[in-house]
Amino acid sequence: MTLPFRDTRLPLRERVDDLLDRLTPGERLAMLHQHAPAVPRLGLGAFRTGTEAAHGVAWLGAATVFPQTVGLAATWDPDLLRRVGGAVGREVRAKKLTDPDVSLNVWAPVVNPLRNPLWGRNEEGFSEDPHLTAELATAYAAGLRGEHPRVWQTVPTLKHFLAYDGEPWRATASVQVRERVLHELELPAFRGPVEAGVVGAAMLAYNLVDGVPAHVSPLVREHLRSWAGDPDALAVVTDAGAPGNLVRLERWAGDLATADSAAVRAGVDSFTDDGDDPGPTLRALRTALERGELEQADVDAAVRRLLTLRARTGEFDEDAPGEQRPYGDVRTDDVGCAAHVALAREAAAAGVVLLRDRGGSLPLPASGTVAVVGPLADTVLTDWYSGTPTAATGLAAALRERLGAQRVLVADGSDRVSLRHTASGRYVTAAGDGALLAGAGAAGEDARFDVTEWADGVVTLRHAATGRLVTRGEASLAATAERVGGWVVQETFRTHADGGTLALRHEGTGRWVVVDPTTGALSPEAADRDGAARFVVRTHRSGTEVAAGTAAGADRVLVVVGNDPHVGGRETQDRASLALPHAATELVRAVREVAPGCVLVLVSSYPYALGGLADEVGSLVWSSHAGQELGHGLADVLLGDAEPSGRLPQTWYRDDADLPDAVDHDDITRRAGYAWGERGVLFPLGHGLGYGSVGYRRAHADRATARAGQEVAVSVELVNDGERPVVELVQVYATAPGLAVPFPRRRLLAHRRVRVEPRSSATAVLDVAVDRLAVRDVTRERTAVLPGAYHLLVGSSAEDVRAELPLVVEGEPLPPREPVRAAAFDAGEGVELVPRDGSGRTVVRAALPGWGARLEFTGCAAAGVAALRCCARGERTGEELLVQVRGASGAWLPAGRAALPAGSWADVEVPLRLPAGERADLRLVLPAGALADELELVRGAPR
């Protein structure tokens, strides 16, 4: 007899409930850890959450490696991302055929908006625009999920809820997200994929949000899970080690039982803690049950969601005689198959962005020689969340395939050096097992190393004779590594020159290299520089000189520089600056002096600030680390076989001055990011060129007035007068100066890619949803489209606007505002959002010592108002709450003041003197350390 939980004819909820009822309380509890044990009596195998699949199957051996997520996003192509997701999901299924431990719950995609380009995990995100992020992530997740109506190919997991985009102190930083920022800039990226029904799980972030750890945040239930409709449709997993952080780092809970029970009550279902050892988690949960901090119903709800996740993969299905299971056609040789490699090449080419094109440098001609110089000239690098490529082709190799080996000249720009240990006088060599020994009497071939500087002062050393990188071995340094990698990188060194000699600090350990006086072995042992071995450097080959010489002898020159994804910016480490490292800059300039028309090719995980370098080269091209087909994809574009169609998914800034803040996410007040800022932009969101250009003519909207819930069809004629086809990405943005609630200076509404053939024209039609104009009305706690005059901006980027179309939105006007919460301010300075003790409410703390905080509330009701009542608490006796009103000149004028209670919460009533009128802008001035919560405008005589 078929047990109900295995009967595919029954509704999913009925099947899951049947299985839940058959599990004992102990079996249920055990399922709350990432590594859930088997239940043999029911035929259930062991299960774990989490297969990494950001841009291919990671950490499970060979797999097709697609472009980094930010590179996939540069395609702006949902259909392509859906196909890539489908291929990745199929390879996950193929891996499971030979390894039952492979989880069909994949931990992808990352949907944290790319606000700050210094973020070390920039490569993992899609875009700075939350709605574009949602659109592209939904497409990728749809591919991972598969097309079968009942059985999911894999179950995608959104990462990381919420407000995560900084690595320093990521487990203790309290990210500031006021209500409008939450609803307009943070939640949409998560909401889109959840509402689309293409994800079955979400991972929580390490950080705190407004003083509350994300792993116990009420936002999980209030928002994240509510979008799924069915409360059991979305499982929530913790990030690795985060539950323990509630006790160890955040000091939020006194013990793990309190922490874990609070996480379950907040919505957590699966604990990723203590590696594959569930013991500490299960002991903590049992203690919480015994204390009454957790109910069995809480455990059952979590297990039901995890069983739902597993049931979706078909794990519990009973095979029907004569029928093939969904995805039963998957084979082990699907991994790295020809179709997936071709798709990887297509994606690599589609994500290439032509940033500037001067003097006809591109595409490369069919004749003549091409010099490819720089550390990434013929190298394919992977990142922390990459798999092992089934094959890999660098740019120079791809060009050789097309042009012939004799026409492609290569120089990687590395210096070849020998190191002589000053104390012994011996040169460093690599022994047969790779161990570094200071033992040679001469600087022969075995004593030579190629030095590449990846970040300012940070280098790798590659043994020239074997091609292996120097790394920290079990006992000493050894030239045995094939690539830079690992959670803690062991292959990088920081140099320190002094008095003609050099010392090396091993970055992975933070210790300085010493030489054993007996064996000559090199190892990172010294705690400070004074104890370090000193070396004299003999340079056999200057990489810059060789690169310049190679360039001088070629007809065309490509300078290929960028980052190693493990160095200088990655998970656990943000970048210090947007600037291109000095060594790379100097290499480019040396080549430009002999080849003024050289093409600068940037291969990187993130944007760079280029300074004058952008003006000194012929053309400028960017690609992410585009996976194993990087070389073929780049070559297809550079040779003109594929038209440049990539567009930037995030702003590139001129320098570090105008970047969004990593902790304060209030880009609205700070006027930061593409939506609110306008200063310091090098290349805007959506920017990218083709080898030809198109003109925009006869832009038109099919209606001049509209209401919420309607669509506006925007059309524009694209004219190509050139001799090459152009692939144009038409974009529509909105702005609305003078709206009752400040509107972004740019908001992306729609985009469409159109191919325009030579000497022809084409019409692009874009459907714009009026609901995309919605802003958060914090007073009434709703998101709504406000009536008013808008402008639809049609162009090829956020700043390259070719036409503007007026649009009047009709609807109910915003009534005068009745402020209800201090945390619902419109603009603020010196503000820290924190939880109010015992209530879970978010309140305002005046955070600037000696100055306090300022909170602005616009459009407040003024008629008949006699006072402002504020629930507040001062820090010191004799402090006051000041209220100001904006005058006709814009200056803030005194409107009232009242004493603050010291050390305890109380209602403070501030008598007000407001000018005549229906509305007024008010500002609250709080002394340092004061707290403010509920607000109320009082009519009639004050108490």
Image (cartoon, helix red, strand yellow):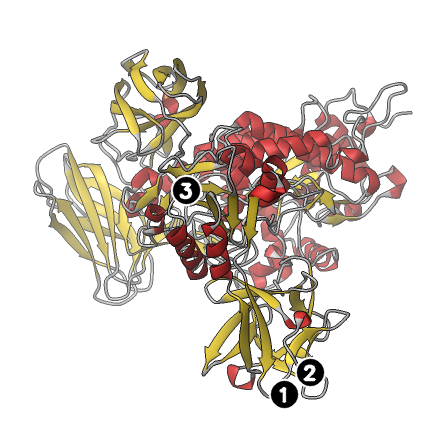
Residue 564 vs residue 678: left or right? Answer: right
Task: Answer few, some or many: residues within 10 Å of disc 2's Cα (few below 14, many 20 plus, some between 14 and 19).
Answer: many
Could you tell me the amino acid type at mark 1?
Ser
Residue 734 vs residue 65: left or right? Answer: left
| Horizontal and vertical percent position of residue 922 | 19, 44
Residue 424, disc: 1
* Distance CA(mark 2)–CA(mark 1): 9 Å
Q: Residue furthest top?
A: 702
Could you tell me the amino acid type at mark 3?
Leu
* Distance CA(mark 2)–CA(mark 3): 47 Å
Q: Nearer the viewer, residue 289 or 411?
A: 411
User: In percent of the image, x 61 and y 34: which residue is there?
Assistant: 345
Tell which circle, 3 or 1, labels the residue nearer the N-terminal end: 1
Task: Report if the CB atoms under discs 2 and 1 are less than 8 Å apart.
Answer: yes
Residue placed under numbered mark 2 in the picture: 520
Count all numbered tags in the image, as a single digit: 3
| Horizontal and vertical percent position of residue 314 | 77, 30
What SS does tag 3 mark?
strand
Picture quarter with the N terminus: top right
Q: Residue 353: tell me if it is visible.
A: yes
Please say if 429 is above or below 241.
below
Residue placed under numbered mark 3 in the picture: 620
What SS does tag 2 mark?
loop
What SS does tag 1 mark?
loop
Please say if 250 is above or below 529.
above
| Horizontal and vertical percent position of residue 721 | 35, 18
